[in-house]
Image (tube, grey):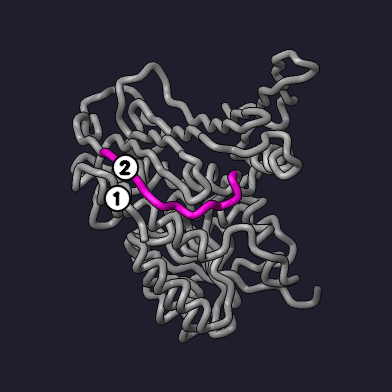
Amino acid sequence: MSKKLKIAVIGTGSISREHLDAYKENPNVEIYALCDINKERVEKRAAEYNVPLERTFTDKDEMFKALPEIDAVSVCTWNSAHAECSIAALNAGKHVLCEKPMAMNEEEAKEMKAAADKAGKLLMIGFVRRHGNDCALLKDYIDKGYLGEIYYAKAQYLRRNGNPGGWFGDKSRSGGGPLIDLGVHVIDLVRYLMGNPKPISVYGATFQKLFNRPHIKGKKGYTSAEAGNNDICDVEDLATALIRFDNGAVVSLETSYSLNLKEGKGDIELFGTKGGAIIKPQVELYTELNDYMVNIEFPHDTALSFKGLFANEINHFVDCILNGTPCLAPAQDGVDIMRILDSVYKSAELGHEVVLD
C-alpha cells in the first residue's frame, strides 16, 4: 500500500510496549505520535521507538489539534482515563483500540460506543484473549458442534501474590481490583466461546483480607511501571461470582490478586452436552467415542502463549481499518462485559443476587 496508517498511542506505561512492539512489526503502520501525562516517560518511550520529540505530547487534545493526520489510536492509560481519551480520539475522527476494561462502568462504556457510532469510526476493545491460538482452536471445535450445548463453565484467574501496585490498587484510577483487571479477561473469553449470550442475573462476592502483601519478600508476578512503597490499596483482593445467561447457561468465576493457594492459575473450563474442554493453558477435549470416555490432548503449539498474542490483536485492528474486516471485539461486547462487572460489584455490595434488565 502507498500510505501507511499513522498510529498514536495514549499512555506509555507497561502495556503500551505490547502495542508498540506489534505496531513496529506491522508493515502497514507508522508509529507516529505518543502521549502521556508523564513527560519523562513519554520521551523515553519515544526514543525507544524512534518517534520524534516534536510528536510527543502530555495533552491528548493538543496532540489531536497539532496532528490531524493521525489515523488511529491505541488507548493504554489507566482505566479511569479510557473513556475520556477514547471519546476525544473518536470525536477527532480517529479509529480507536482501547485496552480492557473498556471503562470504569457501563455508563462510560455506552458513552464511548455512542461517540464511535456518531463518528462512524471503529472502536475495538482490547479483549486480547480472543486473538489467541488456543481460543481459535477451541472455537473451531465449538462452532462445529463437538461440545454440543454449553451449559456450564468455570473461569479462573488467580494470583497468589499478584497485586501489581501503582494505579492498579487505587480504585479511583482502576475502578476495582482483580475482577476488573483479570476477571474481565476470562469472563470475556468464556462468554465469547459460548456465543456471547445475554447476561440476566449475577450473584457476586468480593473480599479484602490480604491487601497487597507489601511485606512479602518474594517477587510479584506482574508489577506496574509506577509501583512504589507508598501505593494505595483500596481494591478487593478476591472476587467470585455466578453469572446466569438468557440461554440457561451459568458461568462460575474466581479471580484474585492475593490468595493463599499453592500457585496461580488461569484455567478456562467449558461443559457441554457432547463434550467438555479446558484451556490450562494446553487445550484438551473430553468426550465420548464408541461408547468410551476419551480425552483428546492437542499439540503444545496450541497452548496459550502471550508471545504473539498482542501482535494478532494489533494486526486485526489494522486489518479492520484498512480492509473493513468485521471486528472480533466490537464496542457492544465491551459494554456487555462492563455491565457484568458492574453487577458483580453491586451484588457484592448488596449481599444478594442482582437481576439485569
Rendered-image quadrant of the N terminus: bottom right
* Amino acid type at image mark 1: Val
Q: Badges 1 and 2: C-beta atoms under 8 Å apart?
A: yes
Distance from the alpha carbon under mark 1 to that under mark 2: 6 Å
Q: Is residue 83 left or right of residue 132?
A: left
**What residue is drawn where x is 49% and y is 44%?**
248
**What residue is drawn where x is 58% and y is 58%?**
329
Secondary element under disc 1, as helix, strand or loop, is: strand
Secondary element under disc 2, as helix, strand or loop, is: strand
Asked if 118 appears above or below 175 in the picture, the reply is below
Rendered-image quadrant of the C terminus: bottom left
Residue 3's image quarter?
bottom right
Q: Where is residue 7 in the image (x, y as percent from the top left)?
A: 59, 70
* Amino acid type at image mark 2: Tyr
Q: Is residue 81 visible?
A: yes
- The residue that disc 1 covers is 354
- The residue that disc 2 covers is 203
Please tell me which residue lies in front, 19 or 260: 260
Q: Where is residue 291 in the image (x, y as percent from the top left)?
A: 76, 15
Please tell me which residue lies in front, 59 or 317: 317
Please tell me which residue lies in front, 151 or 321: 151
Magenta residues span 194-205
Reply yes or no: does residue 195 show up in magenta: yes
**What residue is drawn where x is 34% and y is 40%?**
164
Residue 60's image quarter?
bottom left
First in sequence: mark 1 vs mark 2: 2
Q: Position of residue 305 (x, y in %)?
A: 62, 35
Reply yes or no: does residue 13 show up in magenta: no
Asked if 195 appears above or below 319 in the picture, the reply is above
**What residue is drawn where x is 19% and y is 47%?**
350
